[in-house]
Image (cartoon, grey):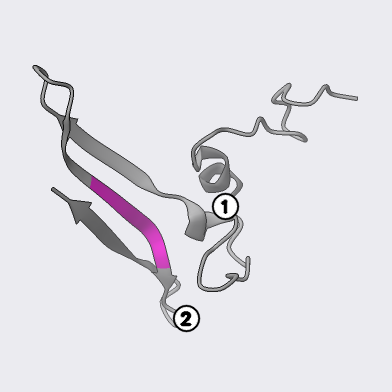
Amino acid sequence: RAKAGAGTPQTPCKSADSTNEFIGGCEDVAAIEGIAPRGLRSALVLVGAFDRRTGVPVLGVINEPFFQRDPQTHRYSQTPHHGV
């Protein structure tokens, strides 16, 4: 039996980001109050920029690459969110 967090194929490591959700590829997770608790729909990509002199964040973009799946084509649409 593998130790918790050992990262074997049967018991993957849990990461702080959505990497594990992306790798697992679980598509049929129902949203709770409009929020996906796990699965592909919970995978997010964050890109940020900051002022190197002060360290203050100046720009951020979060993309939801698996926002919605088309039932006919089975392709996903994505949606970005940004802030300045």
> Which residue corresponds to mark 2?
71
Residue 48 placement (x, y as % from top left): 22, 36
Give above or below for 13 relative to 33: above
Residue 74: image quadrant is bottom left
Residue 73 placement (x, y as % from top left): 41, 76
Q: Give the structural element (helix, strand or loop) at label 1.
A: loop
Residue 65 forms part of the magenta stretch: yes
Instruction: Of the two numbered discs 2 and 1 on the same chain, state the one appearing first in sequence.
Output: 1
Amino acid identity at mark 1: Gly
Q: Residues within 10 Å of mark 2 (few under 14, many from 20)?
A: few
Q: Nearer the viewer, residue 82 or 22?
A: 82
Q: How many numbered circles are shown?
A: 2
> Which residue corresponds to mark 1?
25
Give above or below for 28 relative to 19: below
Amino acid identity at mark 2: Pro
Residue 75: image quadrant is bottom left
